[in-house]
Image: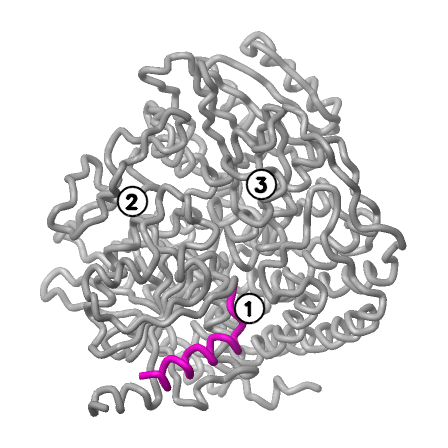
Amino acid sequence: MSWKIWSLKKSPWVFHVNTGACNNCDIEIVDLLTPKFDVERFGIKLVGSPRHADALLVTGGVTAQAAPRLREVYRQTPKPCVVFCIGACACDKGIFTTGYHMVGPVDKIIKEIDPNAIIAYVPGCPPKPEAMISGIVKALSAL
Amino acid sequence: MNQEQLNNKLSEIKDKLTATEQPMANRICLTCEAENSHAINKFLFEDVPLRFVIATGIDSDNWFEVLYHYSYDQTGCMVTLKAIIRDRENPAIESIAPFLPAAEWVEREIHDILGIDFKNHPDMRRLILSDDWPEGVYPLRKDAKMPAKRPDGEPSNRPPVKSPACRTIQLSKPVLAVGPFHPLQEEMEFFQLTVDGEIVTDIDMRISYNHRGIEKISESLQFDQVPFLVSRICGICSASHPLAYVQAVEDLAGVTPPDRALYVRTIINELERIHSHILWAGLAGHFIGYDTVFMWAWKYREPVLDLLEEITGNRNNYGNVKVGGCREDIPDELKPKIVGEMDKIEKKMDMLVKAVTDDPVLHARLKGVGVLSKEDAIKFAVTGPTARASGVAIDVRRDEPYAAYADLDWDVISRPEGDVFAKMVVRLLEVIESAKIIKQAVGKLPAGPVAVEVKEIPPGEVVGRVEAPRGETFHYVRSDGGNRPVRHKVRAPSFVNVPSFKASCIGEHIADVTITLAAVDPCYSCTERLAVVDQNNSVLHDYEALLRLSRERTTQIKKELGVSGLKIGDLQIG
């Protein structure tokens, strides 16, 4: 294990990217920070800039307007980083698959600019906060 | 003015109309040719006066229609003006935005999706489609040919766009760019604030980041599948949107759901309102530097989500309402638990209201900030707590009662001030009202089934509306007798509440903008970036810098007042 991966796995700082989500996954992500789930006790912290982040929590199926912004955010994130597709939309565009303004899903957009990106999926509509924590733990222990 | 007087008033413009229909007691449909629409709209908005709700553009086979929906809140009557544009090649109609700012956005939207030109519109830029969407492709036209491969490549090979959606930044004036990712809004939005020193002098907005094309997707789903789609318009309003849609379709099918279903719908919708308002209160605290309020408010919200999960099986996106009733019943053994939780919520909110209204820092920080005057509230046609905090006491639950609200005893909370403080108080007091409603509804819950069978959806057009946590949710459905809607228009409350920033943010300090933008509760998303562009040295401030500014202002006020503000001890309760 390289020292980069080793350091990535400890206290991951996450950055939240909404690419056209319905806000459900987003409020559940914020819910993770609040007393009932309180992920800061594991060192998981929501940060205000992708440049500080170890992982991206991406929600939504990526609208045409959001796609270039998602690429830009991914470019700004220091590598290695983990991209978490949170929710059904981020995983495969969910119920919005046939929408004319959808260009996702997230993994397609990310792989266009980095074929070797580390991508993890947490399905659900919305995934419960417990599922998100479990997804993060599983992905980090698989690295 | 009662319904009869309204009808008399409307007969004054009879000669300009080609048809007048009244399919139901409180639904009036007027039809006119495109040339007359401007005059009639002006009459409806200024002389009757009616509240503008939204406009809908429709591609009928031989012509285009623009439907202007108005609400007469004294009797709960909806008036729809149908303007017919017969020229399919170059569809055009006179804009009503010059006297009705609330129509500015929707006309831009109709232009984007149907290609109808609005003459004399003050600002006809692209609104809802992405920057790289090809010109001349109108997705909601029935014969629309979608771009085969989407032009979403790298910026270098994007086709040039004739009408850029954002003003190019003029370097003569400092411009503060907010977004497109911003922690205060569910839809990603992009704001450009022109600033003079610390004072905001102009605001421009760009949406589209969250445009998923739901209205088009809805046309491809069956009537029974649509509720699952519309509950995903907004995660926090995921009970209100399907209910508005379902009520519209029930009107069309002539179905009355069983009484028990109406009560179950009431309970779920009020639980949703409670969790949404508490969520807002917490985030509002966060933005002004009261993280204690954030944490405690969200802690109080959890039992409500647990209740929703026990009733519907999910913390959000309940999928419980269907045409003809509900999918899931509230088990009787859950009743005591609901009442018990509501008692606790009432106590907690009483304490929070006291803590907020007694706190001198909050008074100094929020009073007189981001004021939306009553006149502006009417002009921008805002709804929900945003309107009620500006002295416009409208509430669909009272004005056109649906579900079980007419049987229950509760009050519409309204305040005259229009500032952020008033919006906060309205929301906190509404939580207490909601708890009251739920307790009564649980007590009166009638026995019986929760759904009836619906066989046929006849042709016709209907509207349905519901008071969502953020305001009136409006759905328009047109059916041709098939098993899918031929047009489904959705107007979420934020669509009219958000443009009111133009009235409430100008003249404010930058440090107050965060909370003013947040005060209409434009559905929250989470942490991204804000950037401040300075004319001389291109200094970029991010979101955290703005949050810091906002918090520093609170700290400064605290110092001036010599108080420490809220303490955790104040907030603790059982």
Name the mark on residue B474.
Answer: 3
Instruction: Provide the chain ID for the residue under circle 1.
Output: B
Is A133 or B160 nearer to us in this picture?
A133
Q: Amino acid at mark 3?
A: Phe
CB atoms of marks 3 and 2 within 8 Å: no
Which span is picked out in magenta?
A: A126-143
In the picture of the structure, the residue carrying the numbered disc 1 is B279
Q: Earlier in the sequence, mark 2 or mark 1?
A: 2
Tell me how far mark 3 sits from mark 2, CA to CA: 24 Å
* The N terminus of chain A - image quarter: bottom left
Question: Does the segment drawn in magenta span residue A139?
Answer: yes
Mark in front: 2 vs 1? 2
Instruction: Provide the chain ID for the residue under circle 3.
Output: B
Q: Secondary structure at mark 1?
A: helix
The residue positioned 25% from the left and 54% from the top of the image is: B194
Q: Position of residue A52 (x, y in %)?
A: 26, 79
Is A1 or B432 nearer to us in this picture?
A1
Q: Image quadrant of residue B91?
A: top left
Q: Left or right: where does residue B459 sit relative to residue B421?
A: right
In the picture of the structure, the residue carrying the numbered disc 2 is B130
The residue positioned 41% from the left and 51% from the top of the image is: B501
Q: Classify mark 3: residues with Cα within 10 Å, few (<14), some (14-19) or many (20+).
A: many
* The C terminus of chain A - image quarter: bottom left
Q: Residue furthest right?
A: B447
Question: Does the segment drawn in magenta span residue B55?
Answer: no
Same subunit under labels 3 and 2?
yes
Q: Classify mark 2: residues with Cα within 10 Å, few (<14), some (14-19) or many (20+).
A: many
Q: Position of residue A28 (x, y in %)?
A: 50, 70
Is B222 or B205 nearer to us in this picture?
B222
Q: Residue furthest top?
A: B15
Q: Amino acid at mark 1?
A: Leu
